[in-house]
Amino acid sequence: MKKYKGREGWKKVWRENKSLFLFIIVLTAFRSAIADWNDVPTGSMNPTIVQGDRVFVNKLAYDLKVPFTTWHLAQWSDPKRGDIVVFFSPVDGTRLVKRVIGLPGDRIELANEHLLINGRLSEYELLPTGTGRDVPPDKEGLRVYAKEKTGVMPSHPVTILPQRPALRTFGPITVPAGKYFMMGDNRDNSNDSRFWGTVDRNRIVGRASMVVISLDREHYFEPRWRRFFSGLL
């Protein structure tokens, strides 16, 4: 009798809250397969993305997946060099935000902070200090901001930390088929493919295309209004 009452009770809860439950199911499925946002707690993508930014993730940029899985229903594109993507870490499965540097078959090398893609040496143009005006203060010492120009992907800013011990020379390696080489724009303070290897295509969630909101954690979560709905390069 007690079991019967329990079943009837759940049926009553369902009848009274059916619309809410269906809304939650549809919303979570939408966020899983179509679009979502991702909070960025670290500075590995400075100055492009700073701590406290919340970025919009277009999960339909490359493919359509079964909600709550990494199974592909359809695929119409692949990540390009320079895309900022969200993916599951090959180390522990956490969601990370990095820039695609190497495609399958690319030869990637870092020589004294200079990036080479397929033997092509990148060029660097110094940017004003104001480039990183939203980057929170830390103890990393001098920051140098530069525009990285490779000729094979869109130019974008990077951060160099000359006083920090870092992996400034790496490779060369050839990116295996079906995998991608990821790096943070904060080159001297980014845990990326230099340390844990390339990323499987099916681990890529989607492309980060804009900062939706940005809150300054160092100043009581004060909104950084100028960053709201700003595009990512």
Image (tube, rainbow, N blue to C red):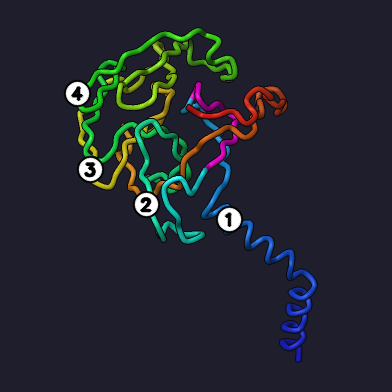
**Residue type at numbered disc 4:** Gly
Task: Return the residue at label 1.
Answer: 30
Q: Quadrant of residue 198?
A: top left
Confirm or deny contact between disc 2 and disc 1 (CB under 8 A): no
Is 122 situated above or below 63? above
Sequence-first tag of 4 and 3: 4
Sequence-first tag of 2 and 1: 1
User: Residue, x 77% and y 85% (percent of image)?
Assistant: 5
Magenta range is: 46-57
Distance between mark 1 and mark 4 Cα atoms: 42 Å
**Residue type at numbered disc 1:** Phe
Query: What label sits on residue 7 in the rendered view?
Result: none
Task: Return the residue at label 3.
Answer: 176
Q: Quadrant of residue 3?
A: bottom right
Sequence-first tag of 2 and 4: 4
**Residue type at numbered disc 3:** Pro
Most extreme residue toward the bottom is 1
Please tell me whether mark 4 or mark 3 is closer to you in this view. Answer: 4
Distance between mark 2 and mark 4 Cα atoms: 28 Å
Helix, strand or loop for disc 3:
loop
Q: Residues within 10 Å of mark 4 (few under 14, many from 20)?
A: few
Sequence-first tag of 1 and 4: 1
Most extreme residue toward the front is 76
Q: Nearer the viewer, residue 29 or 169?
A: 29
